[in-house]
Amino acid sequence: MPNSSETQLDRREAIRQLLQKRPAATQRSLVDALVERGFVATQSSVSRDLREIGAIKNAGGYALPGAAAAGDEELAQVADLLVDLKAAGPNLLVIRTETGAAQRVALALDRCQWPEIVGNVGGDDTVFTATSGAAAQRNLITRIGRATSRHW
C-alpha cells in the first residue's frame, strides 16, 4: 500500500485526535493505537508525523502544544480554592487551600490522572501531593499553573 500524502494527512489527524484525548507516553504507544485504527505506521513515520504536527515531548509524554491537557478542566473547577503551592523536597508538593477545601482539591488532582502524580492526601487546608521525582514535580507545578491560570 503506497504511503500517499492523503494517507499521511489522515494518519496525522488521527495522531492529533489521540493527543487531544491524552498525552502518549511513547511513540510505540502511538504506533500501536494507529495500527488498531487501521493505519500503516512505524516508529519512524510517527516520529516524522509528530515533528510535522508540532507535538512536544514533556514528562507526561508526547502532547500538542497549547492544547488543554487532560485534567486541566478538572483542576480549573477548584482553582479559586488554591492559596499557595510549594515544593518540599524533590518528590512532594505542599498545596495550601481555603479552609475545608483540601479534600476537594485532592480529589480533583486524583481525577486529573496526570502521570506526574503518585498520590494525594488532603487534610483540612493542605494537600500533600507526591511525585515520582524532581522533573515530574517541576512539570506538575507547570501543569497546575496552566490549569489554574496562575504562576506558582
Image (cartoon, rainbow, N blue to C red):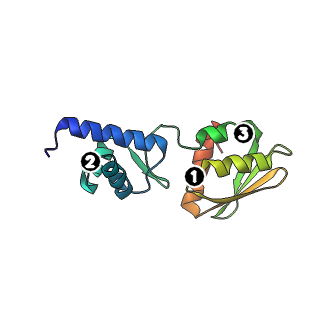
Q: Secondary structure at mark 3?
A: loop
Pointer 1 residue: 114
Left or right of 54: which side holds 74? Answer: right
Alpha-carbon span between mark 3 and mark 2? 38 Å
Which badge, 2 or 1, is on the more N-terminal residue? 2
Write the residue at 85% across / 51% down: 124
Q: Classify mark 1: residues with Cα within 10 Å, few (<14), some (14-19) or many (20+).
A: some
Q: Amino acid at mark 1?
A: Trp
Alpha-carbon span between mark 1 and mark 3? 16 Å
Alpha-carbon span between mark 2 and mark 1? 26 Å
Viewer can see residue 16: yes
x, y percent for residue 33 = 37, 51
| Residue in the foreground of this view, choosing between 61 and 133 | 61
Pointer 2 residue: 48
| Residue in the foreground of this view, choosing between 37 and 58 | 37
Question: Splitting the image into 4 quarters, where does residue 135 fall?
Answer: bottom right
Q: Secondary structure at mark 2?
A: helix
Q: Amino acid at mark 3?
A: Val
x, y percent for residue 7 = 22, 39
Write the residue at 59% across / 44% down: 71
Viewer can see residue 150: no
Q: Secondary structure at mark 1?
A: loop
- Res. 26 mark: none
Write the residue at 70% across / 61% down: 88
Residue 86 in the image: above or below residue 98: below
x, y percent for residue 141 = 61, 50
Residue 88 in the image: above or below residue 151: below
Q: Quadrant of the C terminus?
A: top right
Pointer 3 residue: 78
Q: Amino acid at mark 2?
A: Arg
